[in-house]
Image: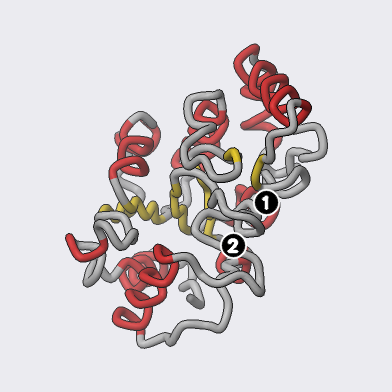
Amino acid sequence: MAQDNLPPSWSPVLQPVLATQEARRLGGWLRAEEAAGKRIYPPRGQRLAALELTPLDKVKVVILGQDPYHGPGQAHGLSFSVPQGVPPPPSLVNIYKELKSDLGIGPPDHGDLSHWAKQGVLLLNNALTVEAGQAGSHQNRGWEAITDAAVAAVAARPEPSVFILWGSHAQAKAARIPELTDSDRHLVIRSPHPSPLSAHRGFFGSKPFSRANAFLEANGRGAIDW
């Protein structure tokens, strides 16, 4: 993580985690993997993009992903998002379908969700790196303590926020964060994952975007322009 500087707004809550032996092991392991010639996505400098684009005090919505896309050029540090010019992956295509059904917003001609992040939507993966072509390859290597702390920091804030949990991995992550599970300040939206394997089991029709905006507006936080 040498080239990924911790954004100032997140530093007070994440610096203690980054100082742990577990985090240092993660950093050393990543450097060793790269030195061995393994390709890791996203590239250095983009791994904390979700935190950079969405300061802690601006977070309104948290959308949790599992790990970055593992295809060439896809991952750029935001869950479910791909850079301009990269075709939207199937899960994002389904997210756009639900957005159209829910709010009548047609899909854009790209898969870059930075415009959500800049409005306060924290697009955070559980693990922030992955080996090329190896889905889930960096799970349980130490990222979880860092991303758990980020989610807990949002949940601990007095401002009501929305947590959108798509799939079992996101829901399991939220379940181990007491600041979230013990709070009635926040709206927690749970549904199946938007993957083509599960979207028809309840993701379609779950209306997460309108539900999130109704909650934010009711609590004086302002709607997201999805």
Residue 181 percent location from the top left of the image: 31, 36
Type of residue at label 1? Answer: Ala
- Find residue 58 and name its label: none
Q: Quadrant of residue 183?
A: top left
Residue 66 percent location from the top left of the image: 44, 44
What is the spatial separation of the Cα atoms under label 1 and label 2, in whole angstroms? 9 Å
**Secondary structure state at the residue bearing disc 1:** helix
Q: Residue at x 36, y 82 (%)?
A: 100
Q: Is residue 166 above or below residue 179?
A: below
Type of residue at label 2? Answer: Ala
Residues 32 and 45: in front is 32
Q: Is residue 202 above or below residue 166?
A: below
- Find residue 49 and name its label: 1
Q: Residue at x 55, y 49 (%)?
A: 70
Lateral position of residue 115 relative to residue 221, left or right: right
Residue 164 percent location from the top left of the image: 37, 55
Q: Residue at x 31, y 55 (%)?
A: 193
Q: Is residue 223 above or below residue 3?
A: below
Residue 113 percent location from the top left of the image: 57, 67
Residues 48 and 110: in front is 110
Q: Earlier in the sequence, mark 1 or mark 2?
A: 1
Whether the residues at callouts 1 and 2 have beta carbons within 8 Å, the answer is yes
Q: Residue at x 59, y 62 (%)?
A: 117
Q: Which residue is mark 2?
A: 117
Residues 51 and 203: in front is 203
**Secondary structure state at the residue bearing disc 2:** helix
